[in-house]
Image (spheres, helix red, strand yellow):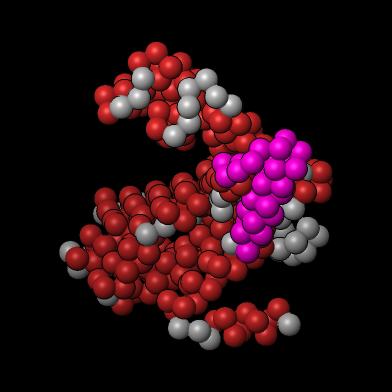
């Protein structure tokens, strides 16, 4: 059934495919936010007796969001901002009254205190909005502001609780993101090798553009890896996944560095192609092999525990490629060709680290 759905999804036009895939990957966070909003409202009304605790479900949704990362921090920032805004607003408005200039003073002071306390973006915004609420709608000295602070705390705590009891698989997004990046690099490597063989400037440029367009995906991967570690820390259902999340998260820097090194290689290759300077066919073959090695790393990343290829399989493939990247290949070459080989060797070190080797071991593989 899963294969049938995947086939139907792949058959959709690209813009629609992208939107449906984005929705599919957000289903669990949407369910989490919906449940948290309803439960937070119920707790605030039934347990605490607040007549209209509108901020409890809002706080629950904000604390969860669609992103897995920094949920604890979002909850803390939310509650802190609300408390600061209410305290400042309540104290000042009771003394200076309400009006245009009073709102200016209250918002400025609340945001100043929030920025001084923490550099997070959410605290100043919540402090300002809470101060405005006190200055315009809630009477100073009343219980409305206090209730709003309690509602924020309820929403934040319920959000974290729902995130722990109805969690996203913490390893799934991280593995998917990493595998997607590695697939992009696989295709770019193959395209670069093909463009260099044919001396096709457009193909080489397309490979460079593909690598340059990965920064957003890298940022998403890092965020999801942090979020996955957070889920595995707070959700009892995934405590056993902590070690696996550590291994997956350890690939973030090597993947990022590998993409950066490939960009340099592609940029140098583009310059050589524009000048009509051909690259040694043996070096182009190594680029082709690197494309295949990226595919092995991608398969390793999405393989379940106990499945193949594993880290040892990927390292074995990469060692065979590394043995071909001999310095002797560029002993009598131009500066540009030598620079490409040097970057290829750096790229191989990054890829070996993705497969689980330490930098010292990876560097030792390249004599």
The percent position of residue 114, horizontal first and vertical second, equals 44, 23
Q: Is residue 257 visible?
A: yes
The percent position of residue 29, horizontal first and vertical second, equals 63, 56
Which residue corresponds to the image point at 39% horizontal and 13% vertical from the top-left?
95
The percent position of residue 72, horizontal first and vertical second, equals 62, 36
- Looking at this view, name the residue that lies furthest to the top: 95
The percent position of residue 278, horizontal first and vertical second, equals 27, 67
Quadrant position of residue 157 = top right
- Looking at this view, name the residue that lies furthest to the left: 275
Frontmost residue, 56 versus 142: 142
Which residue corresponds to the image point at 72% horizontal and 47% vertical from the top-left?
42
How many labels were placed on the picture? Answer: 0
Seen in the picture, residue 127 relative to 22 is either above or below; the reply is above
Frontmost residue, 66 versus 140: 140
Quadrant position of residue 131 = top left
Quadrant position of residue 202 = bottom left
Left or right placement of residue 234 versus residue 261 in this view: right
Q: Answer whether residue 142 is magenta in the image.
A: no
Q: Where the N terminus falls, by quadrant?
A: bottom right
Q: Is residue 252 visible?
A: no
Boundaries of the magenta span: 27-55
Q: Answer whether residue 41 is magenta in the image.
A: yes
Q: What secondary structure prevails in the magenta region? A: helix
Frontmost residue, 111 versus 332: 111
Which residue corresponds to the image point at 42% horizontal and 54% vertical from the top-left?
216
Left or right placement of residue 276 versus residue 221 in this view: left
Seen in the picture, residue 192 relative to 237 is either above or below; the reply is below
Which residue corresponds to the image point at 75% horizontal and 61% vertical from the top-left?
304
Frontmost residue, 132 versus 349: 132
Left or right placement of residue 209 versus residue 127 in this view: left
């Amino acid at each position: 059934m899963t294969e049938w759905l995947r086939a139907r999804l792949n058959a959709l036009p690209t813009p629609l495919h992208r939107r449906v895939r984005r929705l599919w990957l957000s289903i669990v966070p949407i369910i989490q936010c919906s449940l948290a909003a309803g439960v937070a409202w119920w707790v605030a009304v039934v347990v605490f007796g607040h007549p209209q605790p509108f901020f409890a479900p809002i706080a629950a949704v904000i604390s969860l969001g669609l992103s897995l990362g920094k949920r604890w921090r979002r909850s803390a920032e939310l509650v802190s901002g609300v408390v600061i805004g209410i305290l400042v607003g309540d104290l000042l408005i009771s003394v200076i009254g309400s009006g245009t200039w009073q709102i200016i003073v209250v918002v400025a002071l609340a945001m100043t205190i929030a920025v001084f306390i923490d550099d997070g973006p959410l605290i100043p915004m919540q402090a300002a909005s809470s101060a405005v609420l006190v200055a315009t709608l809630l009477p100073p000295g009343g219980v409305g502001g206090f209730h709003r602070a309690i509602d924020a705390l309820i929403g934040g705590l319920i959000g974290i609780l729902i995130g722990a009891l109805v969690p996203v698989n913490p390893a799934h997004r991280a593995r998917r993101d990493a595998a997607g990046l590695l697939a992009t690099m696989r295709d770019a490597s193959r395209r670069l090798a093909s463009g260099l063989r044919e001396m096709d400037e457009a193909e080489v440029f397309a490979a460079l553009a593909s690598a340059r367009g990965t920064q957003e995906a890298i940022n998403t991967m890092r965020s999801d890896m942090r979020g996955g570690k957070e889920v595995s820390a707070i959700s009892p259902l995934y405590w056993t996944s902590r070690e696996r999340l550590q291994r997956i998260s350890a690939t973030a820097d090597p993947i990022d560095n590998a993409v950066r090194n490939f960009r340099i290689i592609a940029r140098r290759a583009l310059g050589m192609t524009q000048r009509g300077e051909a690259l040694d066919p043996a070096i182009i073959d190594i680029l082709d092999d690197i494309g295949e090695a990226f595919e092995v790393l991608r398969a390793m990343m999405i393989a379940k525990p106990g499945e193949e290829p594993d880290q040892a399989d990927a390292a074995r493939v990469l060692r065979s490629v590394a043995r071909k990247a001999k310095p002797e290949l560029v002993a009598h070459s131009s500066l540009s060709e030598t620079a490409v080989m040097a970057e290829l060797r750096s790229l191989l070190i990054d890829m070996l680290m993705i497969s689980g080797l330490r930098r010292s071991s990876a560097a030792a593989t390249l004599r």
